[in-house]
Image (spheres, rainbow, N blue to C red):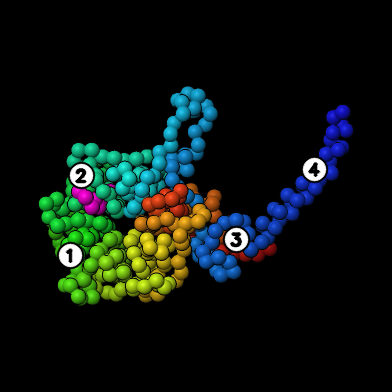
């Protein structure tokens, strides 16, 4: 009886094998984009950005709870990212300001964990908007409602706070570069500079008089690299670039609804070549400009499927964790660095993208 069943199914097995072999061979030899991955710009244009994956809960990092774990500990609810805003990374960690919980979400890619950090006492947070780390791993959090920048060490211990609660100071962004702590204050129309080795001592500020080219209407986010200070001015619909001495250098973008223009510029960052990534919450995308301020491309768009965006707010570049995300990269490409984008709404709270280049053909 067993031999008869096998002989009856043999033609079906043969056809199934041929179909599987054919589909696999097409996927390997086809153009990038035939694998179901999402690319920006899409083929046949040269791909620069690939959407890799989404992180919304602890299950996306640690995997779903196993049956054995449920047997031992019972059903455990995954830890969720509620309403993310600013984002930064340090070594194997990703820090996310979550205004929905009044705290920070910490992703540890080495340990495979996602947890909520909601400090109490002197370190209690109210509206964490943006964050950054220094070379020692200390975490700096700009809290708009507390009206201070709150600082913790790498173990989550409270260190100190910058700013006075009873002034007009309202921090929306923070960036640490060398011995300088730069803080954007939306209500003061300025970016303040503090010295890291002299906590609380004001060392200068950026921002001119109303009507001048370096006036900051509503500074929303800030980033520093290679001696430059990038400020997204949501009230003036552009990014303004300054030197560390406070000198105004140039603008990026302008007001409008065309490519290279902004409606609501928020989070920003820059890669090692000083290409600037700017989130626009109105367009729901990220635009990329070169070091001269010329538009290179954009990615994202209003949400309809994974890889799109839903009220994005923050963006960060990461060169440290390529190995963790390489499994999502199309085999035709090499991953150069990672780009994280926060979405305040929708099913995908953290979009993970890769800046990629096509692999060189190996000589046979």
User: Which one is in front in this view, the residue at disc 2 or the one at disc 4?
Assistant: 4
**In magenta stretch: residue 141:** yes
Q: Which residue is mark 2?
A: 159
Q: Which residue is mark 3?
A: 33
Which callout, 3 or 1, points at the residue further toward the start of the chain?
Answer: 3
Whether 58 is drawn above or below 194: the answer is: above
Q: Which mark is residue 205?
A: 1
**In magenta stretch: residue 261:** no
Query: Does dot 3 land on a helix, a strand or a loop?
Result: loop
Which callout, 2 or 3, points at the residue further toward the start of the chain?
Answer: 3
Query: Does dot 2 land on a helix, a strand or a loop?
Result: strand
Point 79% across, 43% down: residue: 13
Point 19% across, 56% down: residue: 170
Distance in Å between CA atoms under marks 2 and 4: 66 Å
Distance in Å between CA atoms under marks 3 and 1: 47 Å
Residue 128 in percent (x, y) is at 27, 49
Whether 359 is drawn above or below 165: the answer is: below
Residue 360 in percent (x, y) is at 59, 65
Query: Does dot 4 land on a helix, a strand or a loop?
Result: helix
Residue 270 visible from this viewpoint: no
Residue 161 relative to residue 237: left or right: left
Residue 336 in percent (x, y) is at 48, 60
Which callout, 1 or 2, points at the residue further toward the start of the chain?
Answer: 2
Q: Which residue is mark 4?
A: 13
Q: Which mark is residue 93?
A: none
Give the residues in magenta: 139-146
């Amino acid at each position: 009886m067993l031999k008869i069943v096998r002989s009856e199914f043999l033609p079906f097995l043969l056809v199934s094998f041929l179909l599987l072999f054919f589909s696999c061979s097409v996927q390997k030899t086809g153009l990038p984009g035939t694998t179901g991955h999402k690319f920006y710009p899409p083929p046949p244009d040269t791909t620069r950005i690939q959407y890799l994956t989404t992180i919304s809960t602890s299950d996306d990092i640690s995997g779903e709870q196993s049956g054995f774990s449920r047997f031992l500990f019972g059903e455990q609810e995954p830890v969720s990212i509620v309403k993310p805003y600013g984002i930064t990374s340090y070594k194997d960690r990703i820090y996310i300001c979550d205004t929905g919980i009044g705290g920070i979400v910490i992703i540890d890619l080495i340990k495979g964990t996602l947890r909520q950090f909601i400090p109490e006492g002197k370190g209690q947070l109210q509206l964490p908007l943006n964050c950054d780390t220094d070379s020692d791993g200390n975490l700096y959090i700009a809290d708009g409602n507390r009206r201070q920048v709150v600082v913790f060490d790498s173990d989550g211990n409270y260190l100190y706070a910058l700013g006075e609660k009873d002034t007009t100071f309202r921090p929306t962004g923070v960036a640490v570069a060398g011995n300088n702590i730069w803080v954007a204050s939306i209500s003061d129309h300025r970016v303040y500079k503090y010295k890291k080795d002299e906590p609380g001592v004001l060392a200068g500020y950026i921002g001119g008089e109303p009507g001048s080219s370096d006036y900051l209407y509503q500074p929303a986010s800030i980033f520093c690299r290679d001696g430059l200070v990038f400020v997204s001015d949501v009230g003036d619909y552009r990014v303004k670039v300054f030197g560390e001495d406070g000198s105004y250098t140039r603008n990026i973008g302008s007001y409008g609804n065309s490519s290279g223009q902004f409606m609501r510029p928020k989070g920003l960052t820059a890669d090692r070549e000083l290409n600037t990534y700017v989130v626009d919450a109105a367009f729901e995308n990220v635009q990329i400009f070169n070091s001269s301020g010329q538009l290179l491309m954009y990615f994202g768009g209003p949400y309809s499927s994974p890889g799109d965006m839903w009220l994005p707010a923050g963006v960060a570049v990461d060169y440290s964790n390529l190995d963790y995300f390489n499994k999502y990269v199309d085999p035709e490409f090499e991953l150069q660095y990672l780009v994280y984008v926060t979405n305040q709404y929708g099913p995908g709270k953290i979009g993970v993208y890769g800046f990629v280049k096509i692999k060189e053909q190996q000589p046979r």
